Image: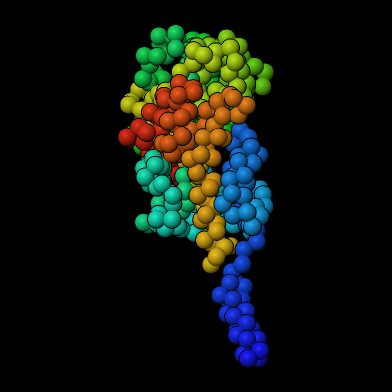
Amino acid sequence: MKRVSTAVMILLMILGMTAYGEERVDTLTYAVYPYLPDPAYYQELIELRWHEVEPDIQLIRAEWDCYKDGVPEGVDVVMYDAVMLDTIVAAGWIQPIDPNAVQNLGDIFPFALEGLAIDGKMYGIPVFLCGNLLIYDQDCEALAAAEHITDLAGMSEILVINSESPVNRKQYLIEVIADARGEANPSVDGVNEDALRLIDCLAIHAHKHDDDTQVVMAYDSGVGEGYIGFSESMRLLKNRAGKTRIKSISFSDQPDTTRMYVDAVAVTVNAEGQRYEKSLELMNVMAEADVLTKLSVRDSAPQYLFLARRIPYQQLSKLFPLYSQMEELAGEGNNRAILTP
């Protein structure tokens, strides 16, 4: 009888090793988008929530930049800008997921999901949105009424715009052409930069080093009546925070082509079997409404991150009214994701 019991135990151990031994996952390595205002805080929130979900699987932080780093070797989950989707998929760095694996899929803005699709396959879960928007003083009637940059022609010293930065200048050029042509993802090849002359005329160069942070700080110090920037820059406002508003504006004399950048979390080709399943679980935590809601407030101060989900805006709008305007912009029915031209 003892021999029989021993044999049964050995058989069960062998079966257990066959079924689970090769699939055992003790750690997962992940990377967040490095250009967030505070990546470390996001990682803290992810890891706190993950410990509640999978306390026996350790998360290991990695660094990966979708714009300039190569293959994310040794990383299970990465975050990338959808403008790089075609490049990343063609390189074979990430793999598609089943939409049914995404928690609360219907809570995500549809255009963001559409921006992650290639040939009917979805490459990740949208988490953040971003775009060049008009952030302005509500008391400025000209900016409150403006629908086009061209409406401001002749109004010197009204906008703080960083048109000297090579990175921003290229973005503005794309914005001008997109609105002029009515295209979400225009090519800038062969286009003369004279299209930026009006923006250059409107730009106020208030600081010696006119980078993104100092543009918002120039506005906050009383320079101009508004500025062009990303929503998260508003977290730096002190003097003008209470009377600031945000909206989209056409960069040409044509109607605004509503569009936003989409930052998504994806599973790499390194993850297979059980590791793939656990990576999907981690992706859902990174895109979870509660995690994103907490990320949007730091030390009782709003961070003004555009989120790809609707639910967080419900609570955030009650605390900080500007989130209501941000939700309207994110939920604009004609929105399209900015992809590689």
Q: Nearer the viewer, residue 183 or 105?
A: 105
Which image quadrant for residue 223? Answer: top right
User: Going by the image, does 310 lie left or right of 74?
Assistant: left
**Residue drawn at x 52%, y 54% as measured from the top left:** 281
Asked whether the viewer can see residue 224, the reply is yes
Instruction: Give the answer, above or below, for where 269 lies relative to 206.
Output: below
How is the rendered protein coloured? rainbow
User: Going by the image, does 58 lie left or right of 190?
Assistant: right
**Residue drawn at x 56%, y 35% as measured from the top left:** 295
**Residue drawn at x 55%, y 25% as measured from the top left:** 302
- The picture places residue 282, in percent across and down from the top left corner, at 55, 52
Which image quadrant for residue 257? Answer: top left
Which image quadrant for residue 7? Answer: bottom right
User: Going by the image, does 134 lie left or right of 238?
Assistant: left
Q: Nearer the viewer, residue 224 or 264?
A: 264
Tally the numbered discs: 0
Instruction: Give the answer, above or below, for where 77 lies relative to 250.
Output: below
- The picture places residue 243, in percent across and down from the top left corner, at 49, 12
**Residue drawn at x 38%, y 16% as measured from the top left:** 146
Asked whether the viewer can see residue 205, the reply is no
- The picture places residue 162, in percent across and down from the top left corner, at 56, 23
- The picture places residue 299, in percent across and down from the top left corner, at 62, 26
Instruction: Give the answer, above or below, for where 254 lies relative to 339.
Output: above
Q: Quadrant of the N terminus?
A: bottom right
